Image (spheres, rainbow, N blue to C red):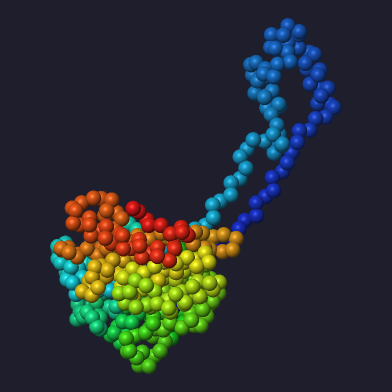
């Protein structure tokens, strides 16, 4: 878990004691009764008859005073004022996305988009614009930046040792992302400089981060992110680093998956004030929809801990199932958010955007709604664009495109629900 020490925490206002209302009943004395009777007898009989003696409603200017005298006293048993309403429970929405894995074709598209608007460099915002409403509409949005950022102007490189245009960071911020996990098998592709540049680029874009670090203090810091009226902690770990040793032997630079450490870090996050703790894991087998034995064992173990509320998976580059475990959720793999792989097409063009609603109850915060949006990187013809599949299908269009969108929808729905998650309330955001 790495971020600038002293992450911003949501402020809570202390509760205020409400004054107890005073209950006052009518007070009638013998003197008041006698005076009222004397006044009544002093009125001539004809006038009493004209005004309707004994009537509940007097005429003329005495009507208001008589009505007031007959009204129940404030706070009495006949008071019809509406009782104070109970405020709704506090809640927030969280969205999360799969791998941000930039390949040369994507930065070529970003360069073309920048040139089309008369700007130099790369503009990744048009590539991501199709999902901006979903991302920016959440209270907190989590991305997974798998590859290190290059220096401004390059040089850039794709697989196997990535170094990608830094303009992706402000584009992610513009799309609505608040925090990124950064522990992956490519974290060390460009050594310590690559780690430092990546985190500096996220800082400059206003995106918090967890999973890699520039110094030991940052490695030990808890990444706390405001989430509506709550505070969310993000932790990030990876299965390995493609055989690359930590730069300079500095093992604190990033976080390998270790169950005991994850649970200890989650307890630290809770103690630091996190209302919800999210664990991001770079794990599983590439191009395989089915979770591995490690995933099926570790994921449920973590969410059964009182200190972990949600597990988010990355790395497989294809959609994997979502599982409901004792009232909480494990997302085994969200596929690619943006990528342009030649391997395992068309499955590597598909991904998920997850959306959870967390609500505060007597036992704390818990996910009370779970949704997903199938995504597709459309690359059959330029321009390359990321689309919300459900929204694109609803908009209609050309038959061949609709057939590809339907294929992505059907694959995602089938895989996501294969462990019974729809039986526990998981739903697509549209469709």
- Please name whichever residue, 4 or 185, is drawn nearer the observer in this view of the structure: 185
Front residue of 374 and 235: 374
Could you tell me residue 287's position as x and y percent? 30, 74
Circle count: 0
Q: Residue at x 37, y 84 (%)?
A: 240
Write down the quadrant of residue 3 in the picture: bottom left
Image quadrant containing the N terminus: bottom left
* Residue nearer the viewer, 103 or 17: 103
Q: Percent position (x, y) of residue 33?
A: 81, 24
Q: Residue furthest bottom?
A: 249
Left/right placement of residue 183 relative to residue 170 reads right
Nearest the viewer among 246 and 227 is 246
Residue under the point 77% across and 16% down: 40
Say which quarter of the image contains residue 186: bottom left
**Can the viewer see residue 10?**
no
Residue 278 % position (x, y): 46, 71
Residue at (22, 79) in percent of width and height:
158
Residue 36 located left or right of residue 130: right
Q: Where does the image place residue 284, in percent across and percent down from the top left?
A: 37, 77
* 70 up-or-down from 293: above or below: above
- Horizontal side of residue 358 vs 101, given as left or right: right
Q: Is residue 236 above or below residue 79?
A: below
């Amino acid at each position: 878990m790495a971020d600038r020490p002293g992450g911003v925490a949501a402020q809570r206002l202390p509760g205020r004691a409400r004054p107890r209302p005073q209950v006052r009943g009518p007070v009638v004395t013998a003197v008041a009764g006698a005076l009222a009777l004397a006044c009544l007898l002093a009125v001539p009989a004809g006038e009493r008859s004209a005004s309707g003696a004994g009537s509940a409603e007097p005429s003329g200017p005495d009507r208001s005073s008589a009505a007031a005298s007959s009204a129940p006293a404030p706070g009495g048993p006949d008071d019809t004022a509406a009782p104070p309403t109970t405020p709704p429970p506090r809640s927030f929405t969280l969205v999360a996305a799969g791998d941000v894995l930039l390949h040369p074709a994507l930065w070529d598209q970003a360069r073309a988009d920048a040139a089309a608007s008369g700007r130099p460099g790369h503009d990744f915002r048009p590539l991501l614009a199709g999902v901006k409403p979903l991302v920016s509409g959440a209270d907190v949005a989590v991305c997974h930046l798998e590859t290190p950022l290059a220096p401004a102007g390059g040089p850039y490189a794709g697989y196997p040792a990535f170094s990608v245009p830094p303009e992706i960071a402000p584009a992610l911020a513009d799309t609505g992302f608040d925090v990124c996990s950064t522990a992956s098998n490519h974290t060390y592709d460009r050594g310590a400089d690559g780690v430092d540049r990546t985190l500096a680029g996220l800082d400059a874009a206003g995106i918090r981060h967890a999973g890699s670090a520039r110094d030991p203090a940052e490695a030990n810091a808890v990444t706390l992110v405001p989430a509506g009226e709550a505070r969310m902690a993000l932790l990030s770990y990876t299965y390995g680093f493609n055989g690359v040793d930590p730069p300079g032997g500095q093992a604190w630079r990033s976080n390998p998956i270790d169950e005991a450490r994850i649970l200890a870090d989650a307890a630290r996050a809770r103690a630091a004030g996190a209302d919800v703790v999210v664990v991001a894991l770079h794990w599983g087998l590439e191009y395989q929809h089915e979770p591995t034995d490690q995933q099926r064992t570790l994921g449920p173990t973590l969410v059964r801990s009182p200190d972990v509320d949600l597990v988010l998976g990355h790395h497989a580059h294809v959609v994997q199932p979502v599982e409901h475990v004792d009232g909480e959720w494990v997302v085994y793999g969200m596929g690619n958010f943006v990528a342009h792989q030649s391997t395992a097409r068309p499955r590597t063009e598909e991904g998920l955007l997850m959306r959870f609603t967390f609500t505060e109850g007597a036992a704390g915060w818990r996910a009370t709604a779970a949704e997903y949006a199938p995504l597709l990187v459309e690359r059959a013809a330029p321009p390359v664009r990321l689309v919300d599949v459900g929204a694109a299908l609803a908009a209609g269009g050309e038959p061949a495109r609709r057939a590809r969108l339907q294929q992505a929808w059907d694959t995602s729905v089938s895989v996501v629900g294969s462990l019974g998650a729809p039986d526990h309330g998981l739903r697509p955001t549209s469709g």
